[in-house]
Amino acid sequence: MPLTLLSRPQAEVWLDENFLPAATAARLFEELQNAVPWRQESITLFGKPRLQPRLAAWYGDATAHYRYSGLTLVPLPWTPTLQQLRRQIEGACSTSFNSVLLNLYRSGQDSMGWHADDEPELGPQPVIASLSLGATRRFRLKPKPRAGIEAEPVSLDIASGSLLVMRGLMQQHWLHAVPKTALPVGPRLNLTFRHIMAG
Ligand SMILES: O=C(O)CCC(=O)C(=O)O
Ligand SMILES: [Fe+2]
C-alpha cells in the first residue's frame, strides 16, 4: 500500500493505514512496550515543572541531541528492532532519519497537546514519519492561529500499523495533537522518526 496524500493548504500529510500487517504491528507493540526503558519526563510550562501525560524514550545516533520544552534528550543507542524499522521507513519516505522519539499513551487519559515539531534543530521543512502501534487514537490537525489558512481542522483515527508522514511546510503552518479520550482505550505506542541537524 502506498502513502496517500491528504490534500490541505500548506499541509503535506501522507498516510498509509496498512504500512505494517496487523500481526507484525501487534508483535512490535508487545516487544517495545516491554523492552523500552520508558520514562515520564517533566517539562517546564509557565516556569513550573509538570509531568508529561505519557511515557517517552529517545533513541538515535549519538550526535542527535534533541532540545524539547526545556529538556535535552541524549539518545539511547539503536536496537536491532528500531534500526530495522528505521531502514524500512526511510525506504518508504526516501529520507534518512538519525533519531526516533517513542511515546506510550497508557490509556485514554494520556495525550499530546497542540504543537508543531518546529524546533530549529529539525530544520525548516522537516520530514517526520510517525508509526502507530496498539490502540486506535484520534490525531488532530489545525492551522496555526496566525497562518492565514482557511481550512477546517482535520481528525484522523490512526489504527495500529499506520504510517503517517508530515513534510514540506506542515510544521510551519499547522499544529497537531492527540487529545485525551473518555473512551475505554488500551495503550498506544507511537514512534516519530526525525532528522536532527548537527548543532
Ligand atoms: O502520537 C502521535 O501520533 C503524535 C506524536 C507527536 O506528535 C510527536 O511525537 O511529536
Ligand atoms: Fe508532533
Image (cartoon, helix red, strand yellow):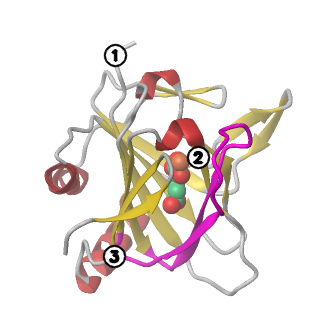
How far apart in space, not on screen, are marks 1 and 3 (Cα)? Answer: 32 Å
The label shown at residue 198 is 1
- Say which of marks 2 and 3 sits in front: 2
Estimate the x, y position of residue 130 in percent, counting from the top left.
39, 56
Is the CB of the residue bearing disc 1 within 8 angstroms of ligand 1?
A: no
Estimate the x, y position of residue 189 in percent, counting from the top left.
46, 65
Left or right relative to 157: residue 133:
left
* Magenta part of the chain: 134-162
- Residue type of the residue flagged with mark 3: Glu
Image point 39% across, 77% down: which residue? 160
> What secondary structure is found at the residue carrying circle 3?
loop
Q: Is residue 136 magenta?
A: yes
Image point 18% across, 56% down: which residue? 92
Within-10-Å neighbours for mark 3: few <14, some 14–19, many 20+? many
Image point 27% across, 30% down: which residue? 61
> What secondary structure is found at the residue carrying circle 1?
loop
Residue marked by disc 2: 174
